[in-house]
Image: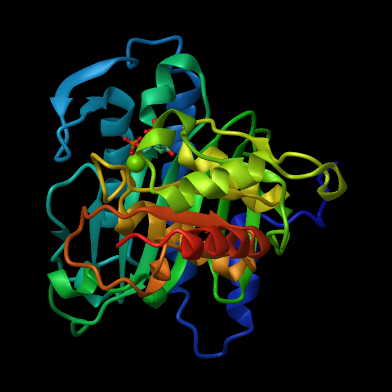
Amino acid sequence: MMNRNVRTLDEFTIQQLRQFPHATGELSNLLRDIGLAAKRVNVEVNKAGLVDILGDADLVNVQGEDVKKLDVYANQQFEGVLRHGISCAGIGSEEIDDYIAFDDSVSNQSKYVVMFDPLDGSGNIDVNVSIGTIFAVYRRVSPVGGPVTRADFLQPGVRQVAAGYVVYGSSTMLVYATRRGVNGFTLDPSIGEFTLSHPDIRCPGQGRIYSVNHGNFFRYAPGVQAYIQRCQRKEKEDGGPYTQRYIGSMVSDLHRNLVKGGIFMYPGTTDKPGGKLRLMYECNPFAFIMEVAGGRATDGSRRILDIEPTGLHQRTPLFIGSSGMMDELEECLAAHPID
Ligand code: AHM
Ligand code: MG
């Protein structure tokens, strides 16, 4: 018997919509489109070990990195559903050099643009580690009716209307945030629908997990090193050392820390002061989700969501997580200022 108390992603977004008499339903449509692409990607991710889709596609993306075949597939799925849907006027993607204006009579009527990383953590595909999709939704600033422009994409993260991620893991989940809250949906394979499993996710104010690539320790700024050591030197009366957890797949690391409490750091290093992660489709969406859930996100000095972007693919250091741990980090950074 179906449990009729379980709400699907569609039912949930439509219920939310009904609370706003003037809402057009465009955002619900958009989320449904994203959910559909995620289901298609999920099917391929799950059989990646079985079929020849696994492996390098002999292509290099705009960042000069190897692209796996599944990245290409995921990008095509997300681009396809958004292009053929009626709720998105254009996209930006980790896999595409410039933004794409769909520029047809239907898409030009839409008020939203979407930026996404179709398959983050793709270096982990070959070894069966959870990977994910990350997306950010903005209301365009150019007039509805015409093609979108660069300015529609280069908006600070604080202007996001919604943001979310999909984690293709032991079960597949879609988590999205609007200003009203963060909600998580688990894919129920028996009906092929995302169903509400984690309503109103709040990030615990104080966590005990820190996530960082420890191999880069000697390349981090002294304040970051001091914070890592502070995590390791926690006294017994404070519960002992914090636990270090780093999957190396941002969506999985951040999903865990969001639910359990924790801090995730991808700092700048001496050789890469801007860090690795991309502002527009990795850091901003997670910063938005984390803030709505009660946490914080900075680049070490600025709130991530306030950064004025200059390029679609720009990088930024990232510190994100439980507000209490962010406070501790900031004490350490302040005690070791960089001249
Ligand atoms: P990608 O976009 O090329 O997949 O890289 C992003 C990933 C994140 O998921 C993860 O947090 C980070 O790279 C790990 O980097 P590192 O191996 O340098 O610690
Ligand atoms: Mg990525």
- Asked if residue 2 is positioned above or below residue 125 in the image, the reply reads below
| Quarter assignment of residue 321 | bottom right
On-image quarter of the N terminus? top right
**Picture mark count:** 0
- Residue 124 position in % (x across, y down): 43, 23
Residue visible at 21% across and 53% down in the picture: 313
In the image, 194 versus 328, the foreground residue is: 328
In the image, 305 versus 214, the foreground residue is: 214
- Asked if residue 125 is positioned above or below residue 21 in the image, the reply reads above
Residue visible at 63% across and 52% down in the picture: 258
- Residue 322 position in % (x across, y down): 64, 59
Lateral position of residue 40 relative to residue 18, left or right: left
Q: Quadrant of ligand 2?
A: top left
- Residue 128 position in % (x across, y down): 51, 18
In the image, 25 versus 327, the foreground residue is: 327
On-image quarter of the C terminus? bottom left
Lateral position of residue 201 relative to residue 227, left or right: right
The answer to whether one can see residue 196 in this image is: no
The answer to whether one can see residue 183 in this image is: yes
- Residue 140 position in % (x across, y down): 27, 77
| Quarter assignment of residue 159 | bottom left
Give the image's coloring scheme: rainbow
Seen from this angle, which residue lies furthest bottom? 22
